[in-house]
Amino acid sequence: MEWRQKHALFGVLLYVGATVFVVYMMNGQPEAKAWNALFWLTQLFVAVNSMAKSFLQEHPHRFRYYYSIVKPVTFLLAKLTYSTLLMILMTGMSLLLYAMMLGWPMANSVLFVVIAVTGSVSMSVVFTFLSAIAARAQQNSSLMAILGFPLVTPVLMILSKLASAALQPVYMPGWWGLALVLIGLDVLIVFLGMILFPFLWQE
C-alpha cells in the first residue's frame, strides 16, 4: 500500500538531487571533513522527510483495519523493513550524486559504503519508531521532532566519527567500540518498539 504512493518516493529523490546540486553550486567540491558532515546532514533530512511519513500518513480508520488482520509486532516489523529498504535506496542515490558532483575523498570506499548502509538502518529505525509514537499521540508530528533530536544526535555523531576512518587510512582507537554501540542502540530501539508498540496499538 505504501508503494502505491510513489509521489513520496520521487519527492524524496528530488529533494536529494536538489540538495546536492545546491551544495555543489554554493561550494563546489568541499574538503573531506566538510564532505563527510554535509553527507550525514543530507541523510538526516532525507530520513526525516521519508521515514516520518511511515505512520503519520496513515488514517486512523486504516489502523483499525490493520488491527483486525495483523499482530502489532508484525505490523511494526513490516514498517521497519520497508523504511529500512527505502532509506538504503536513498543512501545509494545520495552516494552516487555526491560522488558525481562533490567528488569522492574516501581512502577506503568499501568501509564508507558499509558505514553509510549501517547509518541508513540506524536512522530508519529511530524515525520509524518515533513516527509510530507520534501517530498514536493524536497525529502530533511535533512530538517526533522533540523526541528525535536527543536520539538522533548521538547517532549522527557516532556515524561521523566512524566515517572518519574511511577518509584517511590511519588507525583510530575505539572504532569497533563505537560500531558496537551503534548496533546496540539499533537493537535496543527495535526491542523497545516491540514492547511498547502493542500498548500504543490498543489505544
Image (cartoon, rainbow, N blue to C red):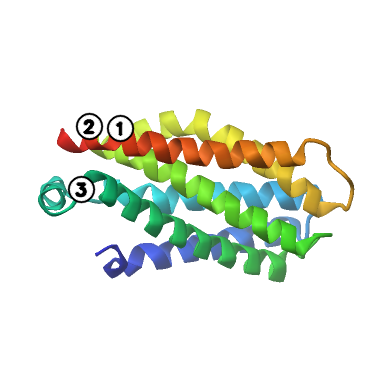
Task: Please give the name of the residue rendered at 53% of the width and 46% of the height, measured from the top-left corner.
Answer: 122
Residue type at tag 3: Lys
Relative to the observer, which residue lies in front, 190 or 30? 190
Percent of width and height locating residue 63: 16, 48
Q: How far apart are marks 3 and 1 (CA)?
A: 13 Å
Of the two numbered discs 3 and 2 on the same chain, state the one appearing first in sequence: 3
Q: Is residue 139 above or below residue 70?
A: above
Provide the residue designation for mark 2: 199
SS state under label 3: loop
Disc 1 crowd, CA 10 A, few/some/many (<14, 14-19, 20+): some
Instruction: Give the residue displayed 44% in from the left and 61% down from the top.
Output: 86
Side (left or right) of 200 relative to 6: left
Amino acid under label 1?
Leu
Q: How far apart are marks 3 and 2 (CA)?
A: 12 Å
Instruction: Classify mark 2: residues with Cα within 10 Å, few (<14), some (14-19) or many (20+).
Output: few
Whether tag 1 and tag 2 are in contact, CB under 8 A, the answer is: yes
* Residue 152: % across, % down: 53, 36
Instruction: Indicate the quadrant containing the C terminus: top left, top right, bottom left or bottom right.
Output: top left
User: Is residue 134 in sight in this rendering?
Assistant: no
Is residue 176 visible to the viewer in this orientation of the structure? yes
- Provide the residue designation for mark 3: 71
- Marker disc for residue 196: 1
Q: Three-letter amino acid code at disc 2?
A: Phe
Residue 163: percent from the left, percent from the top? 73, 49
Instruction: Write down the quadrant of residue 200 in the picture.
Output: top left
Residue contact between numbered discs 3 and 2, judged by CB atoms under 8 Å: no
Above-or-below relation of 103 to 150: below
- For image coordinates 88% across by 53% down, the residue present is 169
Which residue of the protein is positioned furthest toward the right in this rendering?
Answer: 170
Quick check: 171 left or right of 194?
right
- The residue positioned 50% from the left and 53% from the top of the image is 46
